[in-house]
Image (cartoon, rainbow, N blue to C red):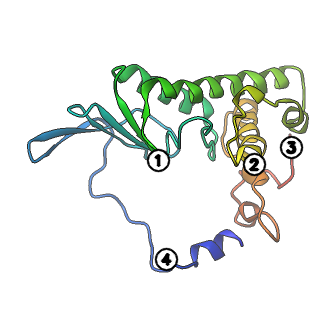
């Protein structure tokens, strides 16, 4: 099933994108019947429009998929920009009190200290890919050698996310400074990203 078929699937046929009523480029305070809540902008986490909701009274932060889920889950670098994601997670950690609760995009709430697993993963990913590039390894060689087993804790989609998304996109970040090495995300019948020219001119299967 390709992207076009997914968009036409049940529940998606009537959906369409719309511009927001309020554009937020700095923190915004909202009064919810006497309870102050902040809409915050820590930075890029998974999309350019990431927003975070902080309830200071409950010491609770809603992050959406910036933090997808706790360990063994790892960040989804679908658009690359691993350094920005790492910086954003560090900002979130530094902002939160030690007893804060984080509601991630999926699964159960977590504690502040649990962010460190994703932070440490991203730093190790950056260091490992950079070392491979410094040693003049190709992307294929880095994918084959960069196992990072200390972070492989049983996440069901580890192999796909680590070797087909995160390593290739981090490689692309470090090699060119531009994001999105999506041609490793293949679909039945071919690469739908290639079909709609979403590779910045890089042909599907190009590893350099």
Residue that label 2 marks: 160
Q: Earlier in the sequence, mark 3 or mark 2?
A: 2
Secondary element under disc 4, as helix, strand or loop, is loop
Q: CA distance from mark 4 to mark 1?
A: 20 Å
Out of 120 and 21, give the one closest to the viewer. Answer: 120
Q: Earlier in the sequence, mark 2 or mark 4?
A: 4
Q: Estimate how packed mark 4 is, as few (under 14), some (14 to 19) or many (20 or more) residues with alpha carbons within 10 Å.
A: few
The reply to whether the C-beta atoms of the residues labelled 4 and 3 are less than 8 Å apart is no
Disc marking residue 207: 3
Q: Earlier in the sequence, mark 4 or mark 3?
A: 4
Q: Quadrant of the C terminus?
A: top right
Secondary element under disc 1, as helix, strand or loop, is loop
Residue that label 1 marks: 105
Report the mark closest to the observer, 4 or 3. 4
- Residue 45 visible in this rendered orientation of the protein: yes
The reply to whether the C-beta atoms of the residues labelled 2 and 4 are less than 8 Å apart is no
Q: Is residue 11 left or right of residue 19?
A: right
- Residue 201 visible in this rendered orientation of the protein: no
Residue that label 4 marks: 11
The reply to whether the C-beta atoms of the residues labelled 3 and 2 are less than 8 Å apart is no
- Where does residue 44 sit, x and y in percent of width and height? 49, 37
The reply to whether the C-beta atoms of the residues labelled 3 and 1 are less than 8 Å apart is no
Residue depicted at x 90% and y 25% = 136
Q: Earlier in the sequence, mark 4 or mark 1?
A: 4
Secondary element under disc 2, as helix, strand or loop, is helix
């Amino acid at each position: 099933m390709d992207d076009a078929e997914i968009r036409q699937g049940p529940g998606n046929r009537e959906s369409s994108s719309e511009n927001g009523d309020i554009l937020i480029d700095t923190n915004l305070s909202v009064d919810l019947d006497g309870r102050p809540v902040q809409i915050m902008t820590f930075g890029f986490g998974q999309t350019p429009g990431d927003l975070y909701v902080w309830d200071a009274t409950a010491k609770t932060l809603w992050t959406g998929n910036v933090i997808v889920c706790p360990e063994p889950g790892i960040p989804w670098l679908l658009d690359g920009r691993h350094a920005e994601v790492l910086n954003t997670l560090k900002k979130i950690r530094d902002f939160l009190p030690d007893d804060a609760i984080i509601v991630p995009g999926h699964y159960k709430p977590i504690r502040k200290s649990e962010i460190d697993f994703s932070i440490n993963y991203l730093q190790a990913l950056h260091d490992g890919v950079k070392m491979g590039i410094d040693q003049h390894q190709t992307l294929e060689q880095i994918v084959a050698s960069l196992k990072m087993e200390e972070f492989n804790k049983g996440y069901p989609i580890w192999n796909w996310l680590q070797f087909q998304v995160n390593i290739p996109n981090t490689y692309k970040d470090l090699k060119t400074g531009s994001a999105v090495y999506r041609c490793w995300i293949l679909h039945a019948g071919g690469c739908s990203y290639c079909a709609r020219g979403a590779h910045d001119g890089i042909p599907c299967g190009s590893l350099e």
